[in-house]
Every structure is written in structure tokens, then in C-alpha cells.
Image (cartoon, grey):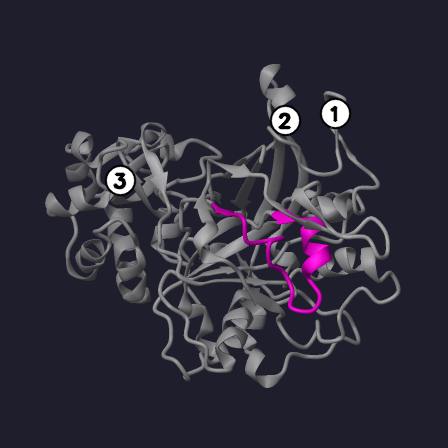
Amino acid sequence: MNEIDDTHSPRKRSWVVSANRPGADFPIQNLPLGVFRTGADAAPRAGIAIGDMILDLAAADAAGLFDGEAALAVTAAAGGRLNILLALGAGPRRALRRQASDLLDADSSLGRRASASAAKLLYPAAQCELLLPVEVRNYTDFYAGIHHARAAGALMMPDNPLPPNYKWVPIAYHGRASSVRISGGAVRRPRGQRRPASDGAAPVFGPCERLDLELELGMIVGPGNALGEPVPIEAAHEQIAGYCLLNDWSARDFQFWEMVPLGPFLGKNFSTTISPWIVTPEALAPFRCAAMERPTGDPAPLAYLHDASDQRAGSIDIQLAVWLRTARMREAGAEAQRIIRSNARHLYWTPAQMVAHHTSGGCNLMPGDLIGSGTISGPERAELSSLLELTRGGAEPVELANGERRSWLEDGDEITFTARCERDGFVGIGFGFCSGQVTGD
């Protein structure tokens, strides 16, 4: 596991003033990776988020501010996608983070040198377009949130909501990589088949009437593994190069009609939104926590899924929230309303267990592959992290402060995910935003 070191020191401050503000998502203790451009005709560039600015890695390298493995990482990040950088593994990524920390430190000699060239190194994030940070060639979505599985399953099978294999195997399906999009775009209401109104009737084809969100954590694969060579559980965490927020938009009416016998298809493949910044495992080291404690009577993981260090610190304490802003709220100038809160600690399977199982049959992961955790619901009503669960299948709509009600998402609704890590003695870090606005079909 990643160790806590001087880059996590709460005494460290950046010469980028906005990074030192209380509650900032991107203080110097974070330093997530991403890709941006400064205009529609500008070339994509790799960067690091610091406060409300973006450090241009290529510009910093050209100024001679990186060397060794960090310089190798910056060279690999050229070209508009971070796949080649992530393929290098943890060493260059960690070297880049450490040198970037020194470069942005207000009290270091390198930091003082860099601050003198700030105009050449930094861009205001608000004036940049954030792009998909990796080429996503493969996307796998797990079902690792047991509270979601239980709540959603109870709507169909109240007496036996969990499938019999749930506590033995990390369940997943392969999603559609081509429709993964970056935060901030429109999500077009999909069209598809809905269940017939009565036995013997024909199904209806048309716009989705039960459009939903799913609050997930995204994992970005680093070096990957060769075909036929499983990744052992004790090494699986090294395959995760970083984390993001993920909204697995869902067309529930399509999903429930089509899912037997092969699982999700049009109900899921129309859009998946991720946040633009890759928060590294190194930045998350202070917020590691024990794997979810299994209730008495639950089976222990099979040997290939069990590692003592992963059980001690394989989960991450990430506070999650879902915010809804309707078209009426925007017209009135009202802020978004939080409708859901949860925490990544509620995952039944750890990220390392997901990777180990994914590769146990010999499947090869590739740099930049996207892995979704599955919906991260908690045990409380306010932690049910999809409208399917929160409204009990649409029967109990969410009441908004302006009097509006939502069983399912309507055109004009904007959904935003946020996430934050906090721990006494450390500076909190965030993930930025994962947003999408529903438009008509």
C-alpha cells in the first residue's frame, strides 16, 4: 500500500494561493492528473490541478523543472491522453507527484524558482476545457455495493434480494467504453423497448420514462497485465493508477425488460460520465481504511481474494454526495440541492479484490481501462445512491425544497456528484465535479 510521507504534511503550503483555501478540492496534498486545452483549436495538454489553476506539465518540463523518472512521466503524458504515462507503473507516477509537490511548494527552492515563472506554467481552470484523461478501451462495471444490491433486489425479490453468489464473487459486467464521456456534457434521453403493458401485448419503443443515476467510484487501470497472467490479490492495488467519480446513467424501464438472461444492454450503454481529474493512490494514502466488516455468518473471501494488508487498509474513506438542480431551480437562480450522501467505505469488495477477480481467469487489463465500483449505497435511507432505491421504484418521490418532486430524472435536470476525503491531522482533498444535464430525445 502507499505510504504517508512529507507530501501529505498539513504544514505544506503552495505558492498558488487558491490551493491553500480551506475546503479546496485541490490543495498541494492532492495533485490529481488530467488533460486540458486552452481553446477549441488548441492541442490537448497534460496537467495537474492545483487550487483553481492547472499546472502545464509540458511547460514545466521545458523550463527544466522535472528530472529523472518525473521527466520520463511528463514525456509519456504528451499527446493528449495519459495511457502511456499510466502504463509506466507506479514509479514514474510517484516521482512526478513528489517533484510536482516540491515545484508547487511555497517554501522550497524549486517552488520559489517556479513561482517566478508562474505566468508560463499555470492556466486558470475556469478558462480551460477539461478533456477525457485517458482513452478508455475497456469498461467494466462491478456490483460491489451490497446495500445497493440488497435495496434494488428487494424491489424485485423482497424475500431474497441478494443473488446466491453475491458474498462469494465480485459480480460485474462489461459496459460500453465508446459512450464514456467527461463531466459537463449533455446526456440525451435514450430510446428503447419498454415492458409490455399486459401479458400478450407488444413492447413499446420510445423515450426512456425511468431515467436514473448511479453514484459510483471509477478506477483507472495503470500498467495492466498480460493475457493469461492473473494479478495476485497482494499486488492488485498496484494496477490502480487513480480514481474518479462515475455516473452510470441507467434507463430502468429498458433495463428491467432486457436484463434476462444476459444482463444490461441498452439500459446502460447510452452514457457513462466520469469526473476529469485522476486522484492518485498516493494522494489517498491518508484516507485508507479497513475493508467493510462482514456481518457474522458471511463467508470469508476465497484465498485468491484475501490479503491481510488489503483487509486492513484496502478501502478508502471518501464522502460522496449527489446534487440535483432542475430547470426551474436554474431559472430561479437557486442552487443545487443535495439529495443523496454516501461513503466509499460501504463497498463489500475492495478495489484490489475487484482487480484480482477480474484477472483471475486470465483477462488482460490495459492502461487506461475504466472499472466502476457499482452503486455505492449505504445502510441509511439518505445513502441510497440511485433514484431506483431512494424512491422505492418511483413510488415515493423525492421532495425538493421548491416543491418539485422527482421519481425519475426529467429533461433539464442536472446531476452533480462530489466527493471529499477528510481525516484529523491531514489536509482534506476533493475530486472536483462529475456533472451531466439531461436533454430530450
Position of residue 269 measured from the top left corner of the image (x, y, whole percent):
55, 53
Q: CA distance from mark 1 to mark 3?
A: 42 Å
Please rate how many residues cluster around mark 1, counting C-alpha atoms within 10 Å: few if below 14, some from 14 to 19, many from 20: few
* Residue for badge 1: 404
On screen, residue 431 versus residue 143, left or right, reads left
- Callout 2: helix, strand or loop? loop
- Callout 3: helix, strand or loop? strand
* Residue for badge 2: 326
Name the amino acid, label 2: Thr
* Residue for badge 3: 55
Find residue 164 and name its label: none
Residue 170 located within the stretch drawn in magenta: no
Name the amino acid, label 3: Leu
Please rate how many residues cluster around mark 3, counting C-alpha atoms within 10 Å: few if below 14, some from 14 to 19, many from 20: many
Q: CA distance from mark 1 to mark 2?
A: 9 Å
Q: Magenta segment, which residues? A: 250-274
- Assess whether mark 2 and mark 1 are in contact (beta carbons under 8 angstroms): yes
Name the amino acid, label 1: Glu
